[in-house]
Amino acid sequence: MNQLVFIEGDQVVTDSLTVAEVFGKRHDTVLRDIRNLDSSKEFNLHNFAEVEYQDNKNRTYKKYLIKRDGLTFLVFGYTGAKAALFKEKYISEFNRMEAELQKMTQPSYMIEDPVSRAKRWISEEEERQQLEQTLKIQEPLVNFAQSCMASERSMLVRELAKLACKNGIVI
C-alpha cells in the first residue's frame, strides 16, 4: 500500500481495497459492510461511489471510492485492535487540529513565544490597517446610504444627485 488517501478527480478519497488491507479484512467483506451500513441513502450517495477497477490479471471488479466522512462512518463500526488503533489516532488527530485552530485564533498578547507573538501582532496590525482602509473607502457610501434612509419622503433625481455630490460621490 503506497497511499492511504489519494486524489480522484477533485476529491480526496480512499477506496475499499485500501480499507481491506489496512484492517486485515477480505475485500468482499468490506464491500458487504459498505452495502449494509445503516446510513441514509443521501449520505451513501455523497460518500461512497462504486467504480470498476482491473486487477493485475486484467480482470474487472467493483470497489468503492470512499470520502472521509464515509470512511469514518464505516470504520467506527469496526471492532478489534486495528480498528481501536485507528479510532485512537483519529481522535488524537482531531484533538491536535483543534489545538492548532485555538492557537491560530489566540490573540497575540496571549502567546508566550516572543517570535510567534511578534508574527501574530504583525498580522493583526496588517489586518487592522486593511480594515481601516476599507472603512475610509466606504465612508462616503455609508454616509450617502444613511442620508437616503433618513429621508421621510420620496426624492427627485436632482435631489439625489445633490445629496450624492454633497457626500463626495462624483456623478
Image (cartoon, rainbow, N blue to C red):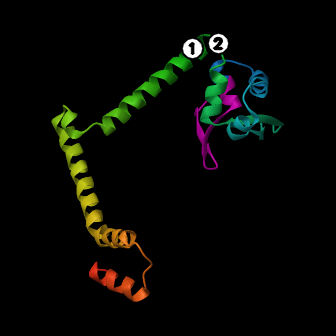
- The span picked out in magenta is 1-20
Residue 110 placed where, x, y %?
21, 33
For marks 2 and 1 on the same chain, the one whose residue lies earlier in the sequence: 2
Q: Residue at x 74, y 25 (%)?
A: 37
Left or right side of 81 for 105: left
Residue 35 placed where, x, y %?
79, 28
Above or below 149: residue 20: above
- Specify whether residue 56 is in view: no
Mark 1 residue element: helix
Judged from this view, the residue extending furthest toward the bottom is 158
The C terminus: image quadrant: bottom left
Q: Crowding near pointer 1: few (<14 within 10 Å), some, many (20+)?
A: some
Q: Mark 2 points at which residue?
A: 79
The image quadrant that residue 169 belongs to is: bottom left
Cβ atoms under marks 2 and 1 closer than 8 Å: yes
> Is 13 part of what is drawn in magenta?
yes
Q: Mark 1 points at which residue?
A: 84
Mark 2 residue element: loop
Q: Residue at x 18, y 43 (%)?
A: 118
Compare residues 55 and 151 and report the one nearer the observer.
151
The image quadrant that residue 139 belongs to is: bottom left
Three-letter amino acid code of the residue under disc 2: Thr
